Image (cartoon, rainbow, N blue to C red):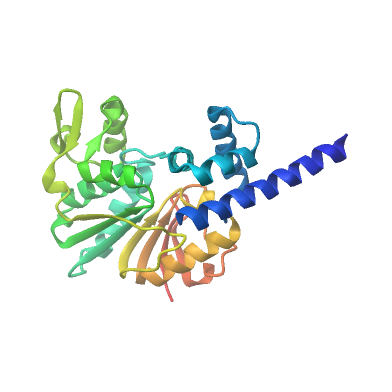
Amino acid sequence: MSQHRSSDGELEKIETVLLLEGIYRRYGYDFRNYSYASIHRRIWHRIHLEGLSNVSSLQEQVMHDSDAFFRLLGDFFIPVTEMFRDPETFLVFRRDVVPLLRDLPYIRIWHAGCSTGEEVHSMAILLHEEGLLDKTRIYATDINEDALQRAKDGMISIDRMKQYTKNYQAAGGTRSFSDYYDSDHGVVMLKPHLRRNTVIARHNLVTDSSFNEFHVILCRNVMIYFNNKLRDQVHKLIYESLALEGFLIVGGKESLSFTPLADRYETRNSPNRIFRKIR
């Protein structure tokens, strides 16, 4: 009986590999080196919603129906973000990193995997308060076109504003959070002047290359969905994109330990995963 279950599991892995290979060849999205456990959950979520029975039946549907593919793609892109997420990270950035950026004539910051833009908007507010926004260009990229459009629109979820205000205050905000947005008929929009120096564009960390040199790169809670091979590949891209003595900030469950480039960085703040490129 256990051998039968084991063979079923192996068969499902084969089906999953074929599905992801098909998606890559048919649509150009590469999920082949994403964490199996994460992608497996999302595939089965879609299988149940579509009323199907196995991965192969989903593959057949996705290969012949682009609408079905985009429904599955929506399951792969589950945005988890908020304004001033992990407020202490923004507080430490304000206290320890901002003073080192002041001497630069021009600052380039990359939010890789920006989702719907809440953390990008948070950075713009922080830099505005520190008097650095006018000499900063923030690049915000993601693979998800719908999320990018929300980021471009500067839309903020009204039902989260109470939590966002608490986050802002905990992150060392120096003004009233309501100074930074307009509210109209239940829609909250970031004030336009805060978006003026932000470039929002599609970029795929899996398949696209470096496009500039940055003084700060934030890639938070993105690589937790990758397997080791892909994680190392993306770390290489980030390293190549980061200026010497530039700062890399990753998510709370992420680390540079056990990556081939770990010795190229020094740890500036371990609890908040802030590293500096030293070679």
Q: Nearer the viewer, residue 86 or 57?
A: 57
Q: Is residue 224 above or below residue 173?
A: below
243 versus 247 height, above or below: below
**Residue 237, image x, y percentages:** 44, 67
Q: Quadrant of residue 40?
A: top right
Total of numbered circles in the picture?
0
| Relative depth, front residue between 71 and 139 | 71
| Residue 269 % position (x, y) | 43, 56
Q: Residue at x 16, y 32 (%)?
A: 178
Residue 214 seen in the current view: yes
Tell me the residue at 29%/33% (across/down). 164
Q: Quadrant of the N terminus?
A: top right
Give residue 154's position: percent from left, percent from top: 21, 41
Please report the residue visible at 11 percent of the width from the left and 47 percent of the height from the top: 193
Image position of 186 (left or right of 233): left
Q: Position of residue 45 (x, y in %)?
A: 56, 32
The answer to which quarter of the image holds residue 172 is top left
Between 226 and 69, the residue placed more toward the observer is: 69
Give the quadrant of the C terminus: bottom left
The residue lying furthest to the front in this view is: 64
Residue 226 in sight: no
